[in-house]
Amino acid sequence: MDRREFIKKTAIAAASTAMAAPVSAMLGQASSGKPDVGEESPSTVKTEGKWKVLMINGSPRADGNTFCALQEIATQLEKHGVGSEIIQIGRAPVRSCINCGGCHQAGECVFDDDLCNTVAQKMSEADALIVGSPVYYGQPNGGVLSLMQRVFYSAGRFVQDKPAAAVAICRRGGATTAFQTMNMMFQMMNMPVVTSQYWNIAYGMGKGQARLDSEGMQTMRTLASNMAWLLEKIHAGGSAAPDREKQKQFMNFIR
């Protein structure tokens, strides 16, 4: 057993003990290893281009309204010569971060039975990120929040300085708070937040209804055009990121 595998096994054992439940009990089924994203996600769609935007469909519905919005973005990106990949989180359980610290030694999340490390690896190869989610009680889907928190904590090096945007889909209200929640992660990781003509929100309840939101779909297309423009500027030459202070300052309110 090599050192990396030992760290993983030790962290998983400690985490399971702390939560007083085995992995299979927490998942509600026997663990079968890391899922194959491409096979299990009907909405996984790829297009090719000079740059790649990774898009996360945070909806359990493969072809619901969140997918409609992301697909509109992907189509517009392709017109600008920018490729994309949409990954759906699906309906399988997504773990929450338990602050075990194992990723700091292993270089990736020690829990390898969901999408976290797969998404992190794809993010290392992508030039930008867009996260879309339906609105549940004025918040993003808990699964996509858990996924992004773990990706950013365990593999933040892969997202630094890459443009990002959030997309929220709702029936009626709560979209702005969900939208703000997702944007807060980007701002802590030095990720330029890509804007549009309005907040990146679309409305719809039944399957495909978001496509009837003409302003929402235009907002998605404008977001895509702005993303393509920013990627063009970033890769035009010169430094890809500003020169920052090397030593990060941490200040706790209670010492």
Image (cartoon, rainbow, N blue to C red):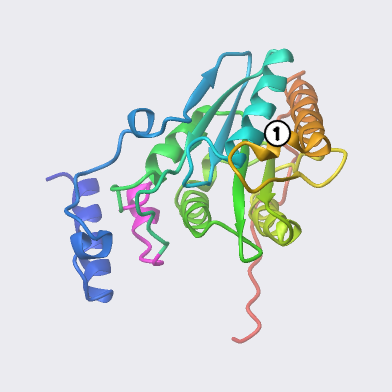
Location of residue 100 with respect to 196 vertically, above or below: below
Give the residues in magenta.
Answer: 98-110
**Membership of 101 in magenta stretch:** yes
Location of residue 208 with respect to 169 vertically, above or below: above
In front: 102, or 58?
58
Residue occupying image coordinates x 67% and y 59%: 181
Q: Residue furthest right?
A: 197
Question: Amino acid type of disc 1?
Answer: Arg
Tell me residue 62's x, y (percent): 48, 37
Per the image, label 1 sits on a secondary structure element best described as helix
Q: Is residue 168 left or right of residue 13?
A: right
The residue that label 1 is drawn on is 211
**Membership of 200 in magenta stretch:** no
Q: Quadrant of residue 73?
A: top right
In front: 223, or 9?
223
Q: Specify few, some or many for label 1: CA neighbours under 10 Å numbering under 14, 14-19, or 20 or more.
A: some
Tell me residue 52's x, y (percent): 59, 23
